[in-house]
Image (cartoon, rainbow, N blue to C red):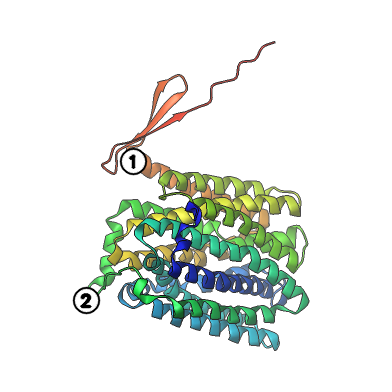
Amino acid sequence: MSATFRSLGVFNYRLWFGGALVSNTGTWMQSTAQDWVVLTQLTDHDATALGITMALQFLPPILMIPITGLIADRYDRRKMLMLTQGALGTLGLALGILVVTGLVQLWMVWGFALLLGIVQAIDAPIRQSFVSELVTPENLSNAVSLNSASFNGARLIGPAVAGVLIATVGSGWVFLINAASFGAVLASLRFIRVDQLQFKPTVKRAKGQIKEGFRYVRGRPDLVVVFVMIFIIGTFGMNFPIFTSTMATQEFGVGASGFGLLTSAVAVGSLSGALLSARRERPRMRVLVLASISFGVTCAIAAVMPTYWTFALVLVAVGLSSITLMTTANGTVQLGAAPQMRGRVMALYMAIFTGGTPIGAPIVGWIANTFGPRAAMGVGAGAGFAAAAVAIVWLVRAQHLRLRHRDGLHFAVRHDGDGLPATESIRLPAPQSTSR
């Protein structure tokens, strides 16, 4: 098996990967349908209402930080995932019934968004750290990248299918199909070979365990800088539902199918980026910096694209840079955290990433309403550049990075902040001579 897919050689991971792919597809279908229902059926293309929906769904990870990570570290992750995934399926079923029967109102969608956020706040750190039980530490970075490939493969399929279903049978059936898709991940969890799971240190009940998690992260500046970058990107950059829906309806005047295809365009790039990340042995800070810069550049280019198809094409590059950034950040945090602290660290990571949305989504939605969706995309571009600046400042100050000239166009970048000697050489291309 190639290096890209080596984690799939493990039975438990292969089973989990298949179930998660089906469930993730359903989740992306529901996300697309929910955005469309709020934007076109329950409001008159009100981006602020959509921003509030996103804010309610992503607020719980912030409020529940004190308990979600501790749950992931203290309890059996497989059994807890069966509970959370079952609850998510039940919520999708209930919302689908309301939409199919025509009883749904905006406040109901907001209520379900909040409930989904509560369950997802518990589910996310458990699901993220459960990967470390499925594979050996040497394959963890690869498994994290393949998880992103699964997630974004689903993002490629789900919105496009949802767009067709919305146009043909209505939004309600999309929610019902999503509810059924959770059966796949529940089946994979049921048939996982428990005796082959990797050892997870048991965290026994004791005082101060919540504060211990915060102190641990505070004492790790290499993790803190990643968290700051993720907060900036997650708050102002990863508002794709607002970007794509407002550009689709306000700038290009396309329907549900066109909206779904824009989300799928992001997914094409994201899937490619995830597979490229899976080939890397370890996540590296320089990749994180370059991905942040690339995200800013591609968002800026997308903001000025004149046609639907040129915008969709650039969204592929936006997706590639964004998922490269996210998988590198996720792998850096998971590999950098001590095993007994991983659940609490990942809870804080997910809270910072998704928890910024309640702040950023309403602001970006207001900007889209007031100044237009292109201005909202410009905010996303600024977030990419700001995140890169944070990392560069940290490298210069904490890692003592220096750019030294050697000869001609040959430079060397040196840093010793981690106590280990490291040198990277950069050779700029020599200017081409021309003859007349």
Q: Quadrant of residue 366?
A: bottom right
* Residue at figure coordinates x 61%, y 78% from the top left: 178
Residue projecting furthest to the top: 436
Q: Residues within 10 Å of mark 2 (few under 14, many from 20)?
A: few
Above or below, 237 relative to 111: above
Point 46% across, 57% down: residue: 6
Residue 143 drawn at (x, y percent): 45, 60
Look at the numbered discs 2 and 1 and tell me whether their residues touch, using CB distance below 8 Å. Answer: no
User: Which residue is tagged 1?
Assistant: 397
Q: Horizontal placement of 139 versus 290: left or right? A: left
Image spot of residue 281 (x, y percent): 42, 49
Report which residue position mark 2 lands on. Answer: 206
Image quarter where the C terminus lies is top right
Q: Element at badge 1?
A: helix
Task: Give me the residue at 71% from left, 70% from top.
Answer: 163
How far is the residue under mark 2 from the one under mark 1? Answer: 37 Å
